[in-house]
């Protein structure tokens, strides 16, 4: 099987990628880690055994961060696909933390001593490399356990490779009880190589060039346009649409939001699910932090009887706008005709203004994250 660098060079030669110095440096570091993981452990030898020398420690993991569209997921795909060991696992960070929470809860019910460390050791047993995409922390529960959990996981010999839109020091920034999360940041900076892939070129933005973001009226034509946006943003083959993965977003407090389609920081939702059900600003904030792009389908015209839905929609757009989330939508009407009359219709004008700004080239060029 061709190695990572060979595959990367082939993509450049074919024109699928453009030469990028930061990408190349990251690819070379990932390839070096592959070599270390694939190398058979050196025998300690007679002298080593006589002196009681311990086996060499596992290689340092990698924390690869950068803005949307810089190629982090592409490099992660190449790394995992070309890593020549069986003891590897690739998983989305949110799905992994939900699994961790479930296992810790079960361990507590089983009265296992130190359930967190026990679960980390169990999950790390026989696992040489664990690869995450889109590491982001949105709730206090995860923030509180991550330092201890990943310390135990690394101590078991598991090497972590992860991508994120933010440098370690900006994770869970301004989050509740952030001091509980600081040990994880210190662990990353101490035990992993932090690589920046934060150059000015947003390759993902180039892929959606020429695609409108607001599609009306509702129907097959509008749906086809947002499907095209999803495929361009995620590199998922359109002919394999039946197998687009779903996801789950932890909203905190034991609540989980099902995401019908979720891949590489792109989430697809229905208006009915996000605004037709009783949700608050905290739910929308969790979505805005977790996804750099949201595809929202089925936005209806709303009248006075849909006052609650209009208020929730406003809160959703506020969260997406403030975190510079890209929005693709199918709607029954243009933004100014969505809620023309009813309680709060005058205030809805601000939402209309934001929706129009979110369609602009200047907004689409912004990086994901809360405004300063």
Image (spheres, helix red, strand yellow):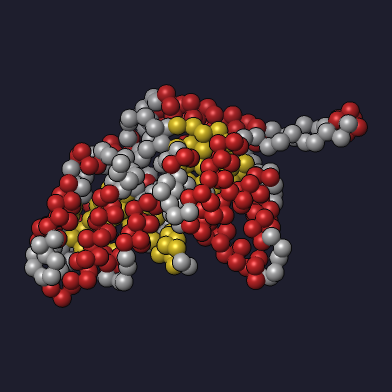
User: Percent position (x, y) of residue 215?
Assistant: 18, 55
Residue visible at 43% across and 41% down in the picture: 170
Residue 266 makes an appearance in the image: no
Question: Is residue 121 toward the left or the right of residue 48 in the image?
Answer: left
* Quarter occupied by the N terminus: top right
- Could you say which is closer to the camera, residue 161 or residue 224? 161
Name above or below for residue 240 compared with residue 72.
below
User: Percent position (x, y) of residue 368?
Assistant: 33, 43
User: Percent position (x, y) of residue 231?
Assistant: 33, 48
Residue visible at 25% across and 60% down in the picture: 315
Residue visible at 78% across and 36% down in the picture: 55
- Could you say which is closer to the camera, residue 15 or residue 94? 94
Question: Is residue 214 toward the left or the right of residue 85 in the image?
Answer: left
The number of discs equals: 0
Residue visible at 42% across and 46% down in the picture: 173
User: Percent position (x, y) of residue 267?
Assistant: 35, 55
- Could you say which is closer to the camera, residue 236 or residue 122? 122
């Amino acid at each position: 099987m061709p190695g990572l660098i060979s595959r990367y060079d082939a993509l450049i030669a074919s024109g699928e990628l453009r030469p990028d110095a930061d990408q190349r440096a990251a690819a070379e570091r990932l390839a070096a880690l592959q070599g270390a993981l694939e190398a058979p452990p050196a025998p300690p030898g007679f002298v080593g055994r006589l002196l009681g020398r311990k086996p060499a420690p596992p290689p340092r993991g990698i924390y690869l961060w950068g803005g949307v569209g810089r190629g982090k997921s592409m490099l992660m795909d190449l790394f995992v696909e070309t890593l020549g060991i069986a003891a590897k696992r690739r998983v989305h960070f949110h799905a992994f933390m939900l699994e961790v929470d479930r296992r810790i809860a079960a361990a507590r019910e089983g009265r296992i001593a130190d359930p967190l460390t026990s679960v980390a050791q169990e999950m790390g047993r026989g696992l040489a490399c664990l690869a995450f995409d889109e590491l982001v922390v949105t709730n206090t529960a995860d923030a509180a356990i991550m330092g201890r959990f990943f310390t135990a996981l690394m101590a078991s010999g598991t090497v972590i490779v992860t991508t994120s839109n933010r440098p370690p020091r900006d994770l869970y920034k301004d989050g509740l009880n952030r001091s509980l999360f600081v040990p994880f940041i210190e662990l990353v900076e101490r035990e992993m190589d932090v690589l920046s892939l934060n150059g000015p070129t947003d390759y993902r933005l180039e892929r959606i060039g020429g695609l409108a973001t607001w599609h009306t009226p509702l129907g097959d034509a509008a749906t086809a346009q947002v499907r095209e946006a999803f495929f361009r943003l995620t590199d998922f083959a359109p002919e394999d649409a039946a197998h687009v993965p779903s996801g789950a977003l932890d909203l905190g407090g034991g609540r989980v939001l099902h995401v019908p389609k979720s891949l590489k920081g792109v989430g697809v939702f229905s208006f009915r699910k996000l605004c037709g059900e009783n949700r608050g600003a905290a739910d929308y904030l969790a979505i805005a932090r977790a996804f750099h792009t949201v595809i929202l389908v089925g936005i209806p015209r709303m009248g006075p009887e849909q006052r609650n839905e209009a208020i929730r929609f406003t809160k959703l757009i506020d969260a997406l706008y403030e975190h510079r989330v890209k929005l693709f939508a199918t709607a029954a009407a243009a933004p100014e005709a969505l809620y023309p009359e009813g309680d709060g219709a005058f205030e809805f004008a601000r939402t209309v203004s934001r929706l129009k700004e979110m369609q602009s080239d200047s907004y689409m060029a912004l990086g994901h994250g809360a405004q300063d």
